[in-house]
Image (cartoon, grey):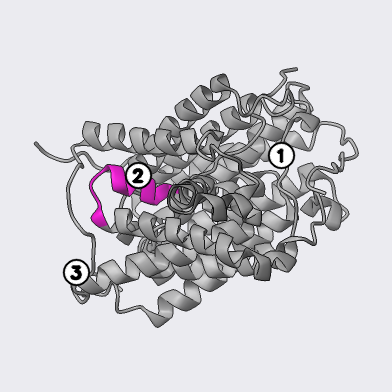
Amino acid sequence: MMATFYSQGLLESSTAFLVSLGIGIFFGFALERGGLGNARRVTGLFYFRDMVAIKVMFSALIVGMLCINYAKSLGWLNPESLYYLPSIYPAQFLGGLLFGIGVALGGWCPATAAVGMSTGRLDALIFLVGSVLGSITFNEVYPWVAPLTQNSQGTQFAFDAMHISEATLVFLFTLLALALFWGSERIEAHGQKIAFPNVRFLKRFSLALLCAAAGLLVFPQKKSVVHAIGY
Amino acid sequence: MKRSPYMNPYLAGTLLGLTLVVAYLSLGAGLGASSCLGRLGAACSLLFAPAHTRASEYFGAWGEHPLLYYIVFMFAGICIGGLISALLANRLELKLERGASLSTGRRAIFALFGGFIVGFASRLANGCTSGQAISGGALLLNGSLLFMVSLFIGGFVTAWLVRKQWNDGNVL
């Protein structure tokens, strides 16, 4: 079992900074490779035209979720060594709503804009300048918006709220992602038949994710640890 | 030199997912980007109004050196990684991406205003697409899933209102 920088209180150490830089390089590389260094492609999903953002986002989420659950089930990862973002419903609901508005208007989100900026997109640079100004404005008006951010519910898991095991929800979430993938391909094909190489790949990819998700159901389910971090 | 085609998006997503796993196993925290923009805001604020910034409740809590934070380094990595990928694929190009129906000036205003809202919103929600939606979503956290759902609602509604932005008769 590995200790994380977070669990050792070393997230602010120079080694953690170096590791973060390395992780960022892979992060940016994957975004650019996938085609998200371009505002038109980032927001294409909102117009049901180019679904690349859905494909990259949900395959990352599902692959990450499956691997983390295997690591936990096999005892390689102690769930208590992770940082869990607290659930603060008013802030996350309003923040998400505004965030979506900003992405649709500006054409970027922060990470894709970082890639856009470093690959020469001036609109990404302008977007990031706007984001820094928006952050400064948040600090200035913080006394007024603070009530929205203070009613933290701590760490709240969706599978606990639904009274099912984590592995069951992982399986259901995988099914949802597969529906999004096949729906995205269908949308891009304008309701016509999905092109052959795409179908063959997506069948294999779907089968691999489904088997991995089903495999998790085999492990005995432990009661989830509800953390008090964030209170 | 010809540009390379983009990678299969599912494989690019898989690479991103594996990067997320490495982040959780080593750092103990997920991916992130927007905190860096907040920290840059705090650094600018400290530069121009040090006393005011130190006294402010939100930025003040970040201390004298807001840029010494792991997400700031991750953000620098994102820029470097994107640059490496674009260089290898010969996709480096200085331009302002816009739909044909939108003038350069108006596209710049859209980008600035959209960025402003995103900067504000990610401080309010304490994260963005990477920190909340992907990293928090992978752990199946209630608040992060709520953020993801409301992001899509806000995005789809707004996109419909500004649908002429990217409309140049290509598809749409």
Q: Secondary structure at mark 1?
A: helix
Indicate which disc residue B104 carries.
3
Return the residue nearer the eye: B51 or A18: B51
The chain containing the residue under callout 3 comes to: B
Query: In x, y percent, where is residue A150?
Result: 76, 60
Residue sitting at 80 percent across and 31 percent down?
Answer: A80
Above-or-below relation of B82 to A110: above
From mark 1 to mark 3, how far is it between C-alphas?
50 Å
Return the residue nearer the eye: B12 or A154: A154
Query: In x, y percent, where is residue A217?
Result: 78, 38
Above-or-below relation of A133 to B106: above
The kind of residue on which mark 1 rests is Ala
Question: Is residue B17 in view from this perspective?
Answer: no
Residue of label 1: A214
Q: Is residue A113 left or right of residue A173?
A: left
The kind of residue on which mark 2 rests is Val
Indicate which disc residue A115 carries.
2
Residue sitting at 26 percent across and 69 percent down?
Answer: B107
The chain containing the residue under callout 1 comes to: A
Q: Secondary structure at mark 2?
A: helix
Compare marks 1 and 2 and give the one earlier in the sequence. Answer: 2
Residue sitting at 52 percent across and 32 percent down?
Answer: B19
From mark 2 to mark 3, how far is it between C-alphas?
21 Å
Query: In x, y percent, where is residue B16?
Result: 49, 37
